[in-house]
Image (tube, helix red, strand yellow):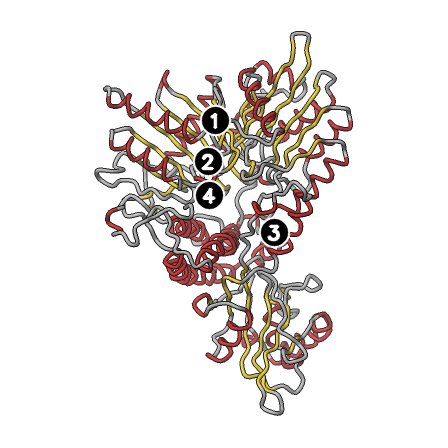
């Protein structure tokens, strides 16, 4: 919400029965992730992953969203969100309350998982389950392998309270010295020099956590101090840095971003987690010293950080427990392209849709490498947001530049938590001779757009790629995304205009084929929704289909409600945040919303308007969020080829029938199971099977 906008001090929730608060909706999404950790139909070892994802999701949520809300509270200005009109304080209070409920659920599921792992030969045990002999053995191990690498900080006049790094684990002890004076000791436990899971030599498959070992043997580190209480703790810090303040014509933008990233690491805490129940005095000292409010302190009965699950998975694989994992799946090469023939010629003659992770991104990287070597290719332009650690995309751009091609790369340095990686890649690209730009003042460039230009006797020929996900080889095997490669020259010419505008530091004011935010996406979506309303009112059957990660744009929400009230059938697949509640009589009764949370992260965006000959289909980089529709540079491309359009629509319709991983959002704002047929349909598994079958059939 923009500052200065007047919103009523209080509004009855019943006046907005079709709206849900963004932050509380996100917590419902993360609960769906957590539910997969407790889903007995998911292989046991894979359920561990979902537990870890739940925690890492929640960490980032507190770092970004709660951090933003707390910044608003600190400003002194009463800010209300525009869906349910909750103040920042009300939202934080509701988040803290709901987090405590979800964390109790997490603990139950974790204990359930550990219980199911015991018959498989895995146990994480406490010291009270060890014999004296084993305790002595572990103490010797501690003194030899761990203690020499620890830094013990006993806070006093000569030693200030140490800075606690974001998400690191620390052992904390409340002490008294010989003179009866109270002290706090802080010991960092997150060290790379020793293992976190330590196997008990006498009990194969039984492990102790290194932080628990440090806490248990802390007396050996503190000499004559009397230990009154002790706990493990973990702090989550605000990471909501304001990247817009650094745009300055006289400042090196990349250097400024590096300084801002350093600032993030020392921002104020928004949450503190403890492993033990401690007294009021120790809690008060920790809260005051760390700088966190008591109601932002959480007690956890399970490990404070769950990346240990990946170590457990590696152990299980080493024991040959493959039956505890998903059946192995790997992306197939698309049958739409013959890798033995010239790819550039093939995509000029027909549109190709790559469907990740079911099909391999190599088809696209191979195309880029071919373009880098092709004598007729004069230029390549691409927008980069998040990249793999060893990016083939970057390698292709470097190769093209070194071969004398005109290579322009927009590297968005403000991709949250990927800033440092992008800064390094920008340097590598510049060193190879690429023309690198960093984005626009006021607008993140989030589009997934690549343009290859060939020089021919007939003039320039464009090959355009538009995607729903990042140019990232790693996530292309983990996220569901769509990548359209087209030789349509109308699309190519408009893509060239998009890049020309970016090079001028401008945004597109008008488009005829592509939808390009911030000025030519939301308004065009509204126009297409209105066309469905008019068609419905004239006696036709209007239809809107939308697949996005989040739905928060109030302008679009209100227009969808208007369409529902007119009788337009609306089907929506919204993975995460959904601020619209369907099924409310008089408002949203013609809207169906499902969320798919499965083995792969749903990430593709699809827009559909009308049916049959009227149908228009787009794939896009933009969710239905205000930040995407009017505050970023995003691109949606029409799917003009009838065969490719049929593929996209078939995928959408199949996902709407997913009753294994697809949960229905009901009129009470709750996500519920559904059964649509005799057998459960898992759309992701279905698409993978189809990709395997298609490749095998092509070999016959």
SS for callout 1 = strand
Mark 1 to mark 2 CA distance (whole Å)? 12 Å
Residue under label 2: 630
Which is more toward the observer, 29 or 405? 405
User: In front of the other: label 1 or label 2?
Assistant: 2
Structural crowding at the residue carrying mark 1, measured as other residues with C-alpha within 10 Å and reported as few (<14), some (14–19) or many (≥20): many
What is the quadrant of the C terminus in the image? top right
Q: Which residue is mark 4?
A: 598
Q: CA distance from mark 4 to mark 2?
A: 30 Å
Alpha carbon distance from label 1 to label 3: 46 Å
Position of residue 335 measured from the top left corner of the image (x, y, whole percent): 57, 23
Q: Nearer the viewer, mark 4 or mark 1?
A: 1
| Residue 477, quarter of picture | top right
**Residue identifier under label 3:** 317
Element type at mark 4:
loop
First-in-chain label (4 vs 1): 1
The front one of 48 and 319 is 48
């Amino acid at each position: 919400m923009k500052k200065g906008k007047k919103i009523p001090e209080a509004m009855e929730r019943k006046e907005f029965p079709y709206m849900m608060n963004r932050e509380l909706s996100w917590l419902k999404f993360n609960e769906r992730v957590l539910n997969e950790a407790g889903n007995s139909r998911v292989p046991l070892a894979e359920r561990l992953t979902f537990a870890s994802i739940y925690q890492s999701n929640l960490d980032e949520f507190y770092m970004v969203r709660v951090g933003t809300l707390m910044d608003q509270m600190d400003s002194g200005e009463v800010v209300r969100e525009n869906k349910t009109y909750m103040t920042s304080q009300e939202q934080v209070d509701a988040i803290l309350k709901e987090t405590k409920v979800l964390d109790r659920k997490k603990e139950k599921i974790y204990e359930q998982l550990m219980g199911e792992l015991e018959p498989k030969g895995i146990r994480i045990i406490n010291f009270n389950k060890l014999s004296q002999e084993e305790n002595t053995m572990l103490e010797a191990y501690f003194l030899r392998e761990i203690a020499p690498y620890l830094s013990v900080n006993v806070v006093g006049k000569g030693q200030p309270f140490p800075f606690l790094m974001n998400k690191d684990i620390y052992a904390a002890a409340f002490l008294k010295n010989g003179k009866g004076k109270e002290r706090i000791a802080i010991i960092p436990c997150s060290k790379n020099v020793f293992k976190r899971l330590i196997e008990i030599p006498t009990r194969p498959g039984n492990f102790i956590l290194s932080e628990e070992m440090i806490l248990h043997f802390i007396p050996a580190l503190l000499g004559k101090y009397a230990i009154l209480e002790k706990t493990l703790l973990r702090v989550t810090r605000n990471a909501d840095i304001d990247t817009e303040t650094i745009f300055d014509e006289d400042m090196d933008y990349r250097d400024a971003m590096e300084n801002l990233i350093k600032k993030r690491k020392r921002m104020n805490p928004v949450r503190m987690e403890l492993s033990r129940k401690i007294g009021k005095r120790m809690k008060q000292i920790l809260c005051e010293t760390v700088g966190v409010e008591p109601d932002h302190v959480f007690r956890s009965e399970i490990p404070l950080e769950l990346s240990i699950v990946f170590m457990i998975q590696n152990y299980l694989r080493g024991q040959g427990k493959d039956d505890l994992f998903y059946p192995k799946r790997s992306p197939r090469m698309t049958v739409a392209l013959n890798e033995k023939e010239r790819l550039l010629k093939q995509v000029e003659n027909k549109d190709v849709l790559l469907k990740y992770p079911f099909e391999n991104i190599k088809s696209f990287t191979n195309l880029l490498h071919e373009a880098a070597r092709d004598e007729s290719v004069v230029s390549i332009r691409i927008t980069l947001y998040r990249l793999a650690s060893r990016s083939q995309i970057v390698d292709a751009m470097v190769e093209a530049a070194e071969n004398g091609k005109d290579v322009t790369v927009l590297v968005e340095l403000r991709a949250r938590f990927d800033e440092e990686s992008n800064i390094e890649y920008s340097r590598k690209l510049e060193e190879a001779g690429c023309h690198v730009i960093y984005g626009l003042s006021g607008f993140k460039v989030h589009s997934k757009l690549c343009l290859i230009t060939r020089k021919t006797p007939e003039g320039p020929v464009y090959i355009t790629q538009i995607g729903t996900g990042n140019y990232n080889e790693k996530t292309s095997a983990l996220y569901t995304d769509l990548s359209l490669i087209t030789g349509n020259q109308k699309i190519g010419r408009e893509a060239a205009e998009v890049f020309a505008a970016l090079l001028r530091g401008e945004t597109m004011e008008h488009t005829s084929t592509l939808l390009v935010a911030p000025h030519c996406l939301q308004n065009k979506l509204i126009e297409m929704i209105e066309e469905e309303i008019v068609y419905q009112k004239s006696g036709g059957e209007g239809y809107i289909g939308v697949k996005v990660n989040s739905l928060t744009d109030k302008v679009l929400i209100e227009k969808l409600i208007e369409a529902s009230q007119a009788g337009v059938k609306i089907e929506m697949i919204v993975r995460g945040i959904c601020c619209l509640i369907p099924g409310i009589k008089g408002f949203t009764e013609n809207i169906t919303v499902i969320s798919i949370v499965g083995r792969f992260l749903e990430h593709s965006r699809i827009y559909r308007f009308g049916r049959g000959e009227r149908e228009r289909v787009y794939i896009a980089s933009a969710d239905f969020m205000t930040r995407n529709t009017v505050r970023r540079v995003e691109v949606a491309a029409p799917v003009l080829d009838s065969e490719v359009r049929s593929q996209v629509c078939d995928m959408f319709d199949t996902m709407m029938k997913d009753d294994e991983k697809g949960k229905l959002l009901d009129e009470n704002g709750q996500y519920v199971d559904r059964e649509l047929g005799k057998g459960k349909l898992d759309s992701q598994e279905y698409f993978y099977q189809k990709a395997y079958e298609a490749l095998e059939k092509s070999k016959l």
